[in-house]
Amino acid sequence: MLAKFTSSGLAAELSAIAALLLVISLAFWVVIGRFRLHNALINIYISFAIMQAAMGEVADFGKYMPLVVFLTLVVFLTIIDSSLFEIHLSGSGLSIWQVVVLSFLEAGLLASIVFTFLPEKQILKYISIGSLDYFTSPLAIILWMVSPLLFLILISRRGK
């Protein structure tokens, strides 16, 4: 199985995707800030929940409309969330390694959600089906949804 993984180019492709996610996560961290990463995560979950509830109506407007509405909701909630969902962190906040890991998990979650809203045929022009499965298979979607929360639980328990 390992030989198939390395010879098929999947390892190189997944490494490139991981590097891209790391760059996106660092940009995400710079734009959002380390003290608002919790808020951004909540905004992603809220936007995804709204999209799941309204998917049929939104999809009627075009194949890319769910993605546009989702991203618009994330940006809108992020802009206004300072007055709605502000979570104040006590102390100095997250350490640098925690910020990097949480940003990476949030970027992976966003990629997973974005890939589920895009037509598979469009995505397969850029990545293989094997790599896409790491983001859009039922298990992968659950893992990307749960992993930021599990990480937050883990780091909050270690701090006590």
Image: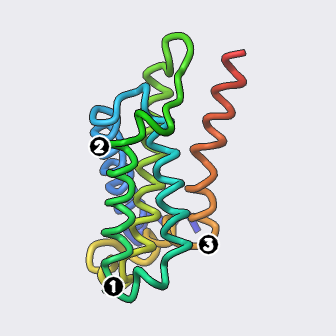
**Secondary-structure class at tag 3:** helix
Q: How many marks?
A: 3
Mark seen at residue 119 = none
- The residue that appears at 34% across and 60% down in the rendered structure is 71
- Assign a secondary structure to mark 1: loop
Residue 144 placed where, x, y %?
A: 56, 56
Residue located beneath label 3 in the image: 138
The C terminus sits in image quarter: top right
Q: Does the CB distance between marks 3 and 2 fall below 8 Å?
A: no
Side of 139 where 50 appears, left or right: left
Report, in whole angstroms, how far the alpha carbon at label 3 lies from the one at label 2.
25 Å
- Lower position in the chain sequence, tag 3 or tag 2: 2
User: Element at badge 2?
Assistant: helix
Q: Are marks 1 and 2 in contact (CB under 8 Å)?
A: no
> Can residue 136 be seen from the camera position used here?
yes
- Residue 130 in percent (x, y) is at 46, 73
Q: Is residue 4 visible?
A: no
Q: What kind of residue is marked 1?
A: Lys
Report the amino acid beneath label 2: Val
Which numbered mark, 3 or 1, is in the foreground of this view?
Answer: 1
Density class for disc 3 (Cα within 10 Å; few <14, some 14-19, many ≥20) is few
Measured from the top left, where is residue 120 in percent x and y?
A: 39, 82
Q: Position of residue 96 (x, y in %)?
A: 43, 22
Q: Residue at x 54, y 72 (%)?
A: 52
Q: Which residue is mark 1?
A: 63
Viewer-closest of 104 and 31: 31
Q: Earlier in the sequence, mark 3 or mark 1?
A: 1
Q: Identify the residue at image location x=43%, y=34%.
A: 83
How far, Cα to Cα, is label 3 from label 1? Answer: 21 Å
Q: Badge 2 is on which residue?
A: 23
